[in-house]
Amino acid sequence: MEGLNILHYITEEDSIEQNEIKSSEDDMKEITISFRNFWQGFQEDKVYSWLTKTLFEGVAKCRVVSENADIGFSSAFGNNKLDGKVKILFLGENWPVDFKPYHFSISHIRSNNIGLCCNLTWPLFAIYYDLTVLEKKSPITFREESLSAPSPLSSLTSISWEKNVRISSNDSIVKSKFCSFIVSNGSCSSRNSFFDRVSEYKHVDSGGRYRNNIGHNIPGIHSDPEIISFIKDYRFNICFENSSTEGYCTEKIVQSMVACTIPIYSGDPRVNDYFNPKSFINVDSYSTKEEAINKIKELEEDHDKYREMYNEPWIKDDFLSRFSPKVLKKFAEKIVRRLDH
């Protein structure tokens, strides 16, 4: 064994296990899939890899074709003719859509069935993030409380953001700034006015295309590391949805949580089904916007009270089980079985 490179050493048991995995993959059914009516740049989005790889993992091998597919996915960004023996709607936006042409749907809507369509409730945050990162929080310090230099958060660049968007729980995050705001869509008047009202109390750094006041736009979308890296320095992040409808909860609130920053949220009336209401400021739960702003002021001016909220767990006890691989596999198996009918 002398001189053996342990990184390349494979035991007999490892070899057997790898052969079993390969054999299992070889035995899986191969299916063809196609896409219609998705957004520009879709193939570079994590949704594309999720639909082509993650969704059918352990169930079937997927091959993308242009037409005459076994399974045809369609979104709501066009009206091109649907494709596929089995038709599946992917709905990530809060838009009215006719579900009748589809056998299955994947959406934010909290229902197992929409008419005759079998629906999987899978919000965008469950696609863009490894949700297990929400189980733990990093310790925080406030710059004015600390005489030491800030924690070396430059180590963030070495993390594999593609799957595990996380800040190491061993890092002490220095919360040196008040509040962030990253918005490109300026159509939400309630969000815009709330930004103005909070800014009357203290300056809010706006890093998006809308109301930008930091001199440059923060690049990236959704779970990109640039977004998280920007938010992490702030004690609060304003993260309103573009619109408010029951069940429509996107990645916006999770961005703040992954960055270990208290979200200031408005949108889904049932957001508390997923997340612990004691861990963030839900503007919609206050009688007036002024009451919500007073809560922000209270936490900003009392670090102990801020920590009390921050130390609350982000998620409900059953949160991870709702979005487990088992749930996904069960749904994928239903789709594949439908092909045999």
Image (tube, rainbow, N blue to C red):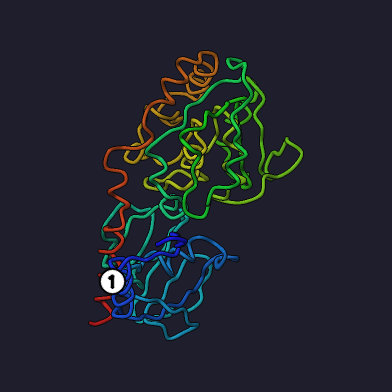
Q: From the viewer's perspective, is 44 left or right of 135?
A: right
Q: Which quadrant is home to the C terminus?
A: bottom left
Give the image location of residue 111, x and y in percent: 28, 54
Question: Residue sitting at 45 percent across and 20 percent down?
Answer: 307
Question: Residue sitting at 40 percent across and 76 percent down?
Answer: 62
Q: From the viewer's perspective, is 160 left or right of 197?
A: left
Q: Which quadrant is home to the N terminus?
A: bottom left
Q: From the viewer's perspective, is 135 left or right of 159?
A: left
Q: How many marks?
A: 1
Give the image location of residue 41, x and y in percent: 60, 65
Residue 236 sits in quarter: top right
Closest to the observer, 190 or 88 = 88
Residue 19 sits in quarter: bottom left
Give the image location of residue 51, x and y in percent: 43, 67
Question: Residue sitting at 54 percent across and 61 percent down?
Answer: 45
For this orientation, the residue located farthest to the bottom is 68
Closest to the observer, 157 or 253 = 157
Instruction: Tell me the amino acid under the disc marked 1.
Output: Ile
Give the image location of residue 63, x and y in percent: 43, 79
Instruction: Decide: is 255 above or below 3.
Output: above
Q: Secondary structure at mark 1?
A: helix
Q: Which residue is mark 1?
A: 16
